[in-house]
């Protein structure tokens, strides 16, 4: 668990300080030095336009991880609000909300995100909107399930009897119970957001050139995959290691939460 935590800190540090420690300008074209193998000056080599791959990876971490954080947090907030609405609203509201949630879940997330991004057009704002729209449903189901189990608790019934508003009840009684489970869900959705950003970037719907992002780096390198495969290996490894680390963290949090529930 400690090694995983250190890896997460490394990725966070890269996202925050990567552009500062990057040795070169990630968008600076240098045609005479194009497709160079790793060397003392460019540790990971250069791409087809002579841009330093290490610098682009470091700058791309801010885009990939930063956008994934925004998307996962937005999905968390939206899904939690919708789930609590279903738990608070009674049988009719619950039925309507959950049927809408099931409808969204029926479509594969990545396919739906590609369709939405294709309709709205390529760009960062379209990417954020598409992945947020397809990411809130799991939060809603978890929040609704826990909310329904809390409705009959004595302290919740008493809070209603003394006249507390639904917002106050949710703030003081529901959210403390929701956050551990939602945190576990959030780690998984954070990793899925990174994959979604990279996938849409590879398809041309994500962050637009010349800005570096791991998915767009894969897109740029695909033409030279046979002659210089390292161009695709570096950003691919960044995505795999980052997603694997976050998923391992989610598994550790889930196990810790399960142990606490057993002790309780």
Image (cartoon, rainbow, N blue to C red):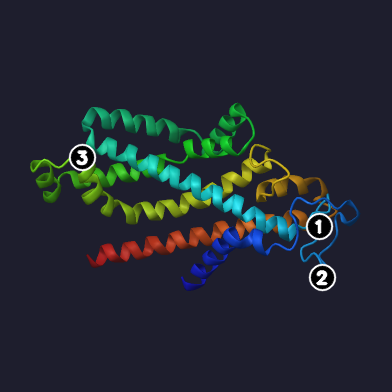
Question: Where is residue 168 drawn, in percent x and y?
Answer: 21, 45
Residue 55 located left or right of residue 67: right
Q: Residue at x 54, y 39 (%)?
A: 128
Label 2 sits on residue: 40
User: Farthest residue toward the front?
Assistant: 20
Real-space Cα distance between discs 3 and 1? 57 Å
Q: Element under label 3?
A: helix
In depth, the one of 140 and 48 nearer the eye is 48
Real-space Cα distance between discs 2 and 1? 12 Å
Eyeballing the image, is 254 above or below 79?
below
Give the image quarter of residue 166: top left
Q: Total of numbered circles in the picture?
A: 3
CB-based contact (under 8 Å), mark 2 and mark 3 = no
Q: Which mark is residue 46?
A: 1
Label 3 sits on residue: 166
User: Farthest residue toward the right?
Assistant: 32
CB-based contact (under 8 Å), mark 2 and mark 1 = no
In depth, the one of 105 and 246 nearer the eye is 246
In the rendered image, the quadrant that contains the C terminus is bottom left
């Amino acid at each position: 668990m400690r090694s995983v935590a250190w890896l997460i800190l490394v990725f966070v540090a890269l996202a925050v300080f990567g552009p500062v420690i990057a040795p070169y300008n990630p968008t600076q074209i240098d045609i005479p030095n194009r497709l160079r193998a790793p060397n003392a000056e460019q540790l990971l080599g250069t791409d087809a336009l002579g841009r330093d791959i290490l610098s682009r990876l470091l700058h791309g971490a801010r885009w990939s991880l930063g956008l994934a954080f925004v998307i996962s947090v937005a999905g968390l907030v939206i899904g939690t609000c919708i789930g609590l609405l279903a738990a608070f609203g009674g049988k009719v509201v619950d039925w309507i909300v959950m049927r809408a949630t099931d409808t969204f879940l029926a479509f594969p997330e990545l396919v739906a995100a590609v369709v939405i991004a294709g309709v709205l057009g390529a760009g960062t704002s379209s990417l954020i909107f598409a992945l947020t729209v397809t990411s809130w449903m799991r939060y809603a189901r978890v929040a609704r399930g826990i909310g329904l189990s809390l409705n009959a608790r004595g302290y919740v019934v008493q809070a209603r009897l003394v006249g507390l508003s639904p917002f106050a009840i949710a703030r003081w009684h529901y959210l403390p119970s929701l956050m551990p489970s939602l945190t576990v869900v959030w780690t998984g959705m954070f990793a899925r957001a990174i994959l979604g950003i990279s996938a849409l970037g590879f398809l041309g719907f994500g962050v637009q050139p010349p800005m570096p992002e791991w998915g767009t780096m894969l897109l740029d390198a695909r033409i030279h995959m046979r002659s210089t495969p390292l161009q695709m290996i570096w950003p691919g490894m960044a995505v795999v290691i980052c997603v694997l680390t976050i998923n391992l963290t989610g598994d550790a949090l889930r196990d810790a939460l399960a142990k606490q529930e057993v002790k309780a």
